[in-house]
Amino acid sequence: MMKALVFKAPKHFDVEERPIPSYGEDELLVKVRFGGVCGTDNRIYQGTKVIQAPRITGHEFSGTIAGIGAAVKGYHLGQRVSVYPMIYCGKCHCCLEGRTNICVNRTTIGYEIDGGFAQYVKIPKEAIACGNVVEIPDNVSDEVAAISEPIAAAYHGIQQAALRDGDTFVIVGAGPIGLFHVQLSKSVRLGKLIVIEPIAEKREMAREMGADIVIDPVNEDAKGIILDATDGRGADSVIIDVGVPSVLEQSIAYVKKGGRFVIFAGNPVGSTVTLDPNVIHYKELVVTGSSSSSADNQREVFRLLSSGKVDCSRMVSGVFPLEDWQTAFEMKANYKGVKTILDPWKE
């Protein structure tokens, strides 16, 4: 038997004893080390993200391979892995265009399939076939590996921003993803990195991680500071890491002519924004989104972490046993710390 955190209904999770999953000849069994708490986990708890119950949630996790089906090749017992949770179909128009991150028919471990908030998790053959079982480098900790999935999503956002050496990059919001973007933007030699964030503690973290300018949008004129810093041109690329429609409306003014505006954060269902189409038209802005990522992105993140170019060791703000899941969820919901993780073996 094993311990697992089970979603029963909105506002109802229970820690239960469950049988350790049996696995078939084309499946793997992973002994979970840590599971990262995501904003989506809170949405499941609140009922705004609808999944079938009962379900073991948790789509961010690290662990070791504890069982290998007879038909599975290329893995060994005890191998440290993280599992990219989204399983693409390989047949829809998005997959055929190479954009598996927005697969029309995707399923996800932790949503449609039991996930990593448990002591063990079964990895289905479809996830293995997609290459989603990713080896963790020896010099990357299990704690950081457990949050590699959102770092990979942030990496895809950096790709969408199309940064080049010398660019001015503006990050709106210094929550976990915004701070990941601060770290990952070091993949190029930026001219200036500007972070906008109302919480002083997170502004300071952004500065310590390499931001050249941090702006308090409550008490400072963000647009004016950005224009001053760019000789009136505006930023080459702006990424929105907060799901607040009014912030999105304000932030498009930060972009230079010919620049890029990337909407990373999801907004509440039914949200609308008002944008002057002439701003997009006359400035020839590229307005795009960034959704999810891929196992290849996760491998690239591990390469960056292993090389030391990206350091996310400070991003884990607390480790909790499954029984204290509510504390971890509340910290996430109330923007306390950066990332909380669950340890299913901790008493």
Image: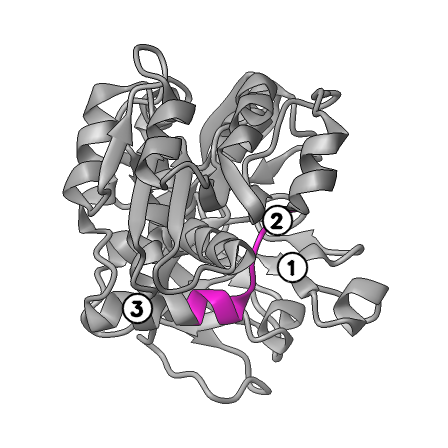
Marks 2 and 1 in Cβ contact (< 8 Å) = yes
Mark sitting earlier along the chain (2/1): 1
Which of these two is toward me, 220 or 301?
220
Q: Which residue is mark 1?
A: 101
Tell me the kind of residue under disc 2: Ser
Residue that sits furthest to the top in the current view: 219
Which region of the structure is painted magenta?
288-299
Tell me the kind of residue under disc 1: Asn
Q: Secondary structure at mark 2?
A: loop
Q: Secondary structure at mark 1?
A: helix
Q: Is 57 left or right of 63, judged from the image as shown?
A: right
Which of these two is toward me, 78 or 231?
231
Q: Residue at x 46, y 55 (%)?
A: 158
Q: Point out residue 91 in the picture as x, y percentages from the top left corner.
A: 83, 70
Residue 136: in sight, yes or no? no
Tell me the distance, in whole angstroms, between the alpha carbons under discs 2 and 1. Answer: 7 Å
Give the numbered dot on residue 125.
none
Q: Which residue is mark 3?
A: 304
Q: Is 106 left or right of 236, judged from the image as shown?
A: right
Q: Residues within 10 Å of mark 2 (few under 14, many from 20)?
A: some
Tell me the distance, in whole angstroms, between the alpha carbons under discs 3 and 1. Answer: 20 Å
Q: Which residue is mark 2?
A: 291
Which of these two is toward me, 145 or 75?
145
For residue 283, above or below residue 141: above
Q: Residues within 10 Å of mark 3 (few under 14, many from 20)?
A: some
